[in-house]
Image: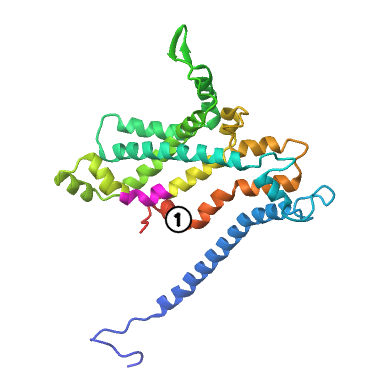
Amino acid sequence: MNGRPAMNGRPAMNARPEMSARPEMDARRVAGSIGATVLTVLWVAPIILLVLAALGLPGAGTNRDTASSIGFDAFREVLAGGPIMAGGIGPYVANSIAVSVPAVLIPLVAGVLAAYALAWIRFPGSSVVLVTLAALALIPVQLALLPLAGFFQDGWQFGSIWLIPPTGLGSSYLPMWCAHAVLLLPLTILVLLGAMTRIPRDVMDQARLDGAGHALILWRIVLPMLWPAIAGLSLVLFTWTWNDLLIALVFAGGLTQVTPVTAYLALFMTSDAAGPSLVSAATVVSMAIPLVLYALAPSVLHRGIRAAVFVDAS
């Protein structure tokens, strides 16, 4: 007979479909690589232009007549202080760290507890709570700022009855911590809830049969399995909080001791002495910490995103 010989009494399988599928897979990989390269260039290009402008290079967003001499003078003044930026940007970067770290930890801790309760504890009204969280996550930030600002400045009063007296904490970090935590908590709960529902129910049932309570299950089983989502979400929330300007302007109130770096840069750019090189150098320094975090932990962010969107993160 014509054709390939049969093996075990069966005709040989034709390998042409598999061979034709390989070029399609290779083409997809090439297209994905090109797309990732283009996105990387688009993301890195503004940073490179900022660095060049900070160095005072003509054509990088600076004016040859108004830019300072080419060199690291702008970075020196930003970091160590000088005649224009007295004291440098260091205190404001420290304020941003003092605001961002607690503002991320508060919704994460509360979000883990709330997501565990919604996922594994049956209680009446859980569906209503879930719908309410979804609605709160869609509320614009601006709608919540006015009542929060009024609470920390004047307290809450109903007629002649003080529901919450004035706290006198308007000149501290606490208002910004609470504002960020309140606004980030609904989204945090929903993301962690999505990752937590992927834990096999058999694992949870077996732990209960072994006599483990909710606290032990959360600490020994849920948190280790939820770590990728928590770590990736932490990076996103930290960057979100670090780059925030609206809450910083509303709650810092122009107080130097609590002003984050974003609010300081916004005010500094309005001054006549702020040249393009100095502003660019200050911007580069202000975003150094988020950039370093993303550069050191790209796999953490990737695994966290995969865990949060219901894809196996192993």
Q: Position of residue 107 (x, y in %)?
A: 42, 37
In this picture, which residue range is highlighted in magenta?
Answer: 224-231
Report the amino acid beneath label 1.
His
Q: Is residue 198 visible?
A: no
The residue under the point 47% across, 48% down is 235
Residue 242 as seen in the image, left or right of residue 137: right
- What colour scheme has been applied to the protein in the rendered image? rainbow
Residue that mark 1 sits on: 302
- Please count the marks in the image: 1
Residue drawn where x is 72% and y is 43% of the image = 82
Residue 112: x, y in percent? 35, 40
Q: Nearer the viewer, residue 1 or 277?
A: 277
Which image quadrant is residue 91 in?
top right
What secondary structure is found at the residue carrying circle 1?
helix
Q: Position of residue 1 (x, y in %)?
A: 32, 93
Name the residue furthest right: 65
Can residue 177 be spotted in the picture? Answer: yes
